[in-house]
Image: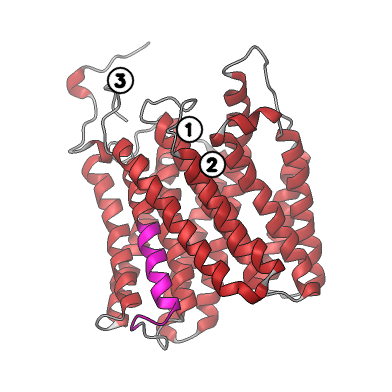
Amino acid sequence: MLQLQSPSERPSSPHPILNLSFRVFFAGGGVFAIITMLMWVFVFMGKTNIDAVTINPFYWHSHEMLYGYTLAIIAGFLLTAVKTWTGMMMPYGYRLLGIFSCWVVARVGWVMVGLGVGNPLLWLAMAAIADLAFMSWTALVITKAVLAVKQYKQMGIITKLTLLTLGNALCYWGIYSGDPDFVRIGIYLGLYLIIAIVLTIGRRVVPFFIERGISFEGSEKVQVKNSKVLDVLSLVLFLIFMIVDIFYPNKYLLTVSAAGVALVNSVRLLGWYHRGIWQKPLLWSLFLAFVGMCISFVLFAVQPWLGFNHSLAVHALTISGVGMMTVAMMSRVSLGHTGRSIHQPPKMVVPILLLMVGVFIFRVLLPLVAMDYYTVWLMMAQTSWILCFTLFCITYVPILAAPRPDKLFG
């Protein structure tokens, strides 16, 4: 029997940005993406007082790009998506503000460490408590919703979130124990678990978005191809790749597993392809993110034999699987979940997405062909990243902070 809520029973929050998690986390993540990259420019140039004995500056950068920026976007997306998947109300209002505040406090701690202000170990202690509270709280509310409706197929996502919390804890343990191996493992475990989430969620939503987006305007009914065999192969080969690259360095196994992941996902992309995506920036951006990940795994496969820096393949994967994917998803979700048309995105969306493509070109492709100009390419990539998120914040933060046009809660 259908039950209607009276207006007095509808959820309410002190500000629209706290209605659903994607609002506050996408806005906060977008702003932080600018702050942390600006800081990395100064840290990289030796213009801050960061204590390199306490934390390797490269690990500082890696941690905040993964456990800072990326986890904010993942939390915003999952805490919103789980509401759709399970029908259970996710935290909003002051409860949501509590989760978000934990994330903010952790970021403040890491910023202070990057600036070299005060005792870095005290700042990191504050950050550790807040970070692990943020991640544990997020995982807990998602787990409760999933178990309440017995959607056990979502347990894979919960497992990845739990392992991400463990990876972050390893980073902090490595810093306090003075063992950089724990920090390295925590960073790489975090990266590959995030990519695993991207591959899992991407497999669910990208073909669905392509079908809905292209079928919307015409009489053509688009149906893309998917394969259970490819899904299993992608998962197994990626798991082998992750274990080999983190724990068991073997160039033969690395090449075979990375090449396998690239091949499987390239075949998957061929099944998803439709020429109509090039008319839709919110579709071609998602498609190109997967293309970039395929290129990244090819780079992992050939790196042991061609001798270029392992970091180049890592950055290819993070820029495509994290940078492009998150910007593309935020650009779409921020419209659809605020009651706006995803088929008529803001005009600034194209420059935003092209700037992230530029980051990939400057940070990955050009160094491969002209390493002598590496510093130039690096600075151009950093500039493109900062401009991308500056335009994103200018365009989307007002949308994320405004009530829905239809007056509904969300």
Image point (30%, 27%), residue name: 404
C-alpha gap between disc 3 and disc 2: 31 Å
Looking at the image, residue 98 lies above or below residue 248: above
State whether the magenta stretch is mostly helix, strand or loop: helix
User: Would residue 53 be seen by someone viewing this image from the given angle?
Assistant: yes
Amino acid type indicated by mark 1:
Trp
Residue bearing mark 2: 154
Residue located at (77% from left, 47% from top): 264
Q: Which segment did they paint magenta?
A: 32-49
Amino acid type, residue under disc 3 in the picture: Asp
Quadrant (top left/top right/bottom left/bottom right) for the N terminus: top left
The crowding category of the residue bearing disc 1, from other C-alpha atoms within 10 Å (few below 14, some 14 to 19, many at least 20), is: some
Density class for disc 3 (Cα within 10 Å; few <14, some 14-19, many ≥20) is few
Q: Is residue 349 left or right of residue 219?
A: left
Compared to residue 410, the image places residue 295 above or below, namely below
Q: Nearer the N terminus, badge 3 or badge 2?
A: 2
Q: Residue 230, how many percent across, how many down?
A: 76, 43
- On the image, numbered disc 1 is attached to which residue? 85
Q: Earlier in the sequence, mark 3 or mark 1?
A: 1
Residue 406, disc: 3
Identify which amino acid the numbered label 2 is placed on.
Gln
Mark 2 is surrounded, within 10 Å at the Cα level, by few (under 14), some (14 to 19) or many (20 or more) other residues, namely some
